[in-house]
Image (cartoon, rainbow, N blue to C red):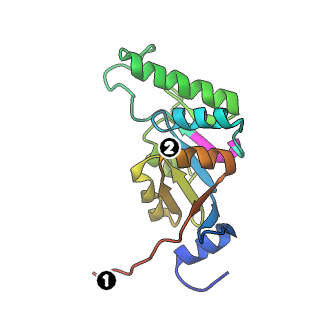
Amino acid sequence: MSSGTLYDKVWDLHQVSQLPGGSTQLFIGLHLIHEVTSPQAFSGLKDLGLSVRHPERTVATVDHIVPTTSQARPFADPLAEEMLATLEANCAEHGITLHGIGSGRQGIVHVIAPELGLTQPGMTVACGDSHTSTHGAFGAIAFGIGTSQVRDVLASQSLAMGKLKVRRIWV
């Protein structure tokens, strides 16, 4: 393990290989998914004839579409109901743990992982949600990723990316 920042150490421990273009193939220890960015990612897997590489390292929850007045099914919003049904079907097909409505473990995707003890110091986390970087507060390196990257992590349990610059801020 190299000396340096926590970021450097975690990065080095999760580096799978250096790619020809200069990027790093980085292993993702925890992949969080939800109903918004995952449907297209699963469709992309199907189009490519791929399956989920490590379903045991992927955890799903229903997040953005949960009604605040009544969570009775079917949801009053047909699009929200369709998104939830799609997430349920994809998780069942691929053996992914889903913390759904009524499970007592469902919630905001970037909040439940620390609450449930899934986010741990020294791990890499990825999720199709811009708030994912908050897992850094727990000593993890976390990346908010786009839909095509969600597909890539589902298929390979890794991300191809360049190492980010680290800055020290003194207050």
Disc 1 target residue: 170
Horizontal side of residue 63 vs 97, given as left or right: left
Horizontal side of residue 4 vs 131, given as left or right: right
Quick one: SS at disc 2? helix
Quick one: SS at disc 1? loop
Q: Amino acid at mark 2?
A: Thr
User: Residue 43: where, in percent of width, then height?
Assistant: 59, 32
Front position in the image: 147 or 103: 147
Q: Amino acid at mark 1?
A: Trp
Which residue occupies 44% across, 77% down?
166
Q: Which residues are magenta?
A: 55-59
| Disc 1: CA contacts within 10 A as few (<14), some (14-19) or many (>=20) | few
The label shown at residue 121 is none
Q: Quadrant of the N terminus?
A: bottom right
User: In whole angstroms, how far apart are the C-alphas of marks 1 and 2?
Assistant: 35 Å
Disc 2 target residue: 147
Q: Quadrant of the C terminus?
A: bottom left
Q: How many marks?
A: 2
